Amino acid sequence: MSTEETRDTDPVDGEDEERNWSPLLSPFIPLLLLALVVTGWFAFETTQLLRERESLRTTRAAQEKNVLESTKLRRTVESITRGTLELANNGNAGARLIVDELKRRGITINANPTSPPPTTK
């Protein structure tokens, strides 16, 4: 047997190497890295969500004026169409023609006023 073969099979040398390497195989370092990565990921995601929320708030605030104007316009148009329907029901030929044309195009006129859609803040 050569010296290299005895070193490979000698149990005493193998045990010494295991004792020297065991502190390096501790789960502390991988778990620490895992904890740091997860913490970093949560911090990144939280930052992104906060930015997105602020962006959505800004967009909504910018659209608020347009929504109010469109609601006002819708109420005005509904008022005019209800008046036209009332005239048509009272026998006005021009109003009857307008109501019939709107029906032909698929637009129905609600005789009862509708309540405004609920606004959420």
Image (spheres, rainbow, N blue to C red):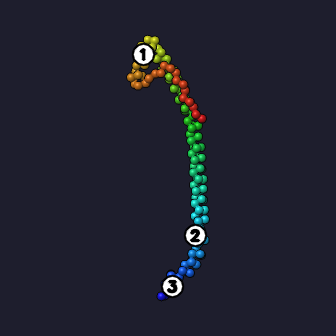
Total residue callouts: 3
Q: Farthest front residue? A: 11
Kindly identify which residue carries mark 2.
25
Q: Amino acid at mark 2?
A: Leu
Q: Earlier in the sequence, mark 1 or mark 3?
A: 3
Q: Amino acid at mark 3?
A: Thr
Kindly identify which residue carries mark 1.
96
Where 87 falls versus 78 (above or below)? Answer: above
Tell me what residue is drawn at x 50 percent, y 81 percent: 9
Residue 41 screen position, x and y as percent? 57, 55
Quarter of the image with the C terminus is top right
Residue 112 shown left or right of residue 26 in the figure: left
Q: Residue 69 is drawn in which quadrant?
A: top right
Tell me what residue is drawn at x 56 percent, y 30 percent: 118
Task: Look at the numbered discs 2 and 1 and tell me whether their residues touch, using CB distance below 8 Å.
Answer: no
Residue 106 screen position, x and y as percent? 41, 25
